[in-house]
Image (spheres, grey):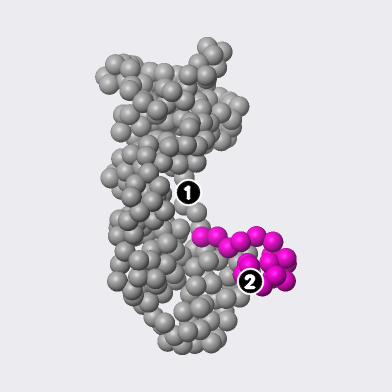
């Protein structure tokens, strides 16, 4: 229970994440074994056992053990859900250069979960992960640049990071990059490229991308005008939950707004 007594100080601790000296040296004998056992239990969905073994690995300084334990706390698997403890363990791993932990920590700062919301720190950690080609981090960093949160609003930078993530198959980034090409923000306006990225996101099930692609077919921007294709994509968008809020009846029937496929988190 000693760990729970430190929860009150977790947010302050999580803001700095200067790892103890022990985290900078080689792992003690047995920590790799604890990590392997913990991951095996996690794969078997025995989260209580996974938490016990991953805690051993994490406390021995394993960055992946720290990340994995943080994820259990984030999702409430084998332990009570606790975003503050998730942030603490992500922080230890992030300080060791663990890209998935850096991304996960950045997202917590972006959302204010377990730590005080801080877009500047979100951008810092997301940038660290994005530099390691972590697609989800690249998407979220692009989103910060697009919205001007924690960084200056910069559509060119947003397009850069969205493209990096989109090329790795991130549907949300593909959709966002397509909108920048369609609107000519941060990149020269190019409806053909917009249609290309909308299609890739649409094929992953993004109802927003399906709707936007349908509109391009209807107007003939970037693709040949094709009413049949337009109707097909617009129907797919509706079937996948797209709501045109200007159409009250449709909004009542569907009950939720359209979404882009959100990237899998770290």
Q: Quadrant of the C terminus?
A: top left
Q: Relative to 189, is 176 above or below?
A: above
Assign a secondary structure to mark 1.
loop
Question: Where residue 88 sits: x, y (%)?
Answer: 45, 26
Q: Relative to 209, is 107 above or below?
A: above
Q: Quadrant of residue 57?
A: top left
Residue appearing at x 37%, y 44% in the figure:
150
Assign a secondary structure to mark 2.
loop
Sequence-first disc among 1 and 2: 2
For mark 1, what is the residue? 264
Residue appearing at x 61%, y 61% in the figure:
257
Residue 21 horizontal side relative to residue 232, left or right: left
For mark 2, what is the residue? 246
Residue appearing at x 45%, y 41% in the figure:
110
Which region shows up in magenta? 243-260
Question: Where residue 206 sits: x, y (%)?
Answer: 52, 64
């Amino acid at each position: 229970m000693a760990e729970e007594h430190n929860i009150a100080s977790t947010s302050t601790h999580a803001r700095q994440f200067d790892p103890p000296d022990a985290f900078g040296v080689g792992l003690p004998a047995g920590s790799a074994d604890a990590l392997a056992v913990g991951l095996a239990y996690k794969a078997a969905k025995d989260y209580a056992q996974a938490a016990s073994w991953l805690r051993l690995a994490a406390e021995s300084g394993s960055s992946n053990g720290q990340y994995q334990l943080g994820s259990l706390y984030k999702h409430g698997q084998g332990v009570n859900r606790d975003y503050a403890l998730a942030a603490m363990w992500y922080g230890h791993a992030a300080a060791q250069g663990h890209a998935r932990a850096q991304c996960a920590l950045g997202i917590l700062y972006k959302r204010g979960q377990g730590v005080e919301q801080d877009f500047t720190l979100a951008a810092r950690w997301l940038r660290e992960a994005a530099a390691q080609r972590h697609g989800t981090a690249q998407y979220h960093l692009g989103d910060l640049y697009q919205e001007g949160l924690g960084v200056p609003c910069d559509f060119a930078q947003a397009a850069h990071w969205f493209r990096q993530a989109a090329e790795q198959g991130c549907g949300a980034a593909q959709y966002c990059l397509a909108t920048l090409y369609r609107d000519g923000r941060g990149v020269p306006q190019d409806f053909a490229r917009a249609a290309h990225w909308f299609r890739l996101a649409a094929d992953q099930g993004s109802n927003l991308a399906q709707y936007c692609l349908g509109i391009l077919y209807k107007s003939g921007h970037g693709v040949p005008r094709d009413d049949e294709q337009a109707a097909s994509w617009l129907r797919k968008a509706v079937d996948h939950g797209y709501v045109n809020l200007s159409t009250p009846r449709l909004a009542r029937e569907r009950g939720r707004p359209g979404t882009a496929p959100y990237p899998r988190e770290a």
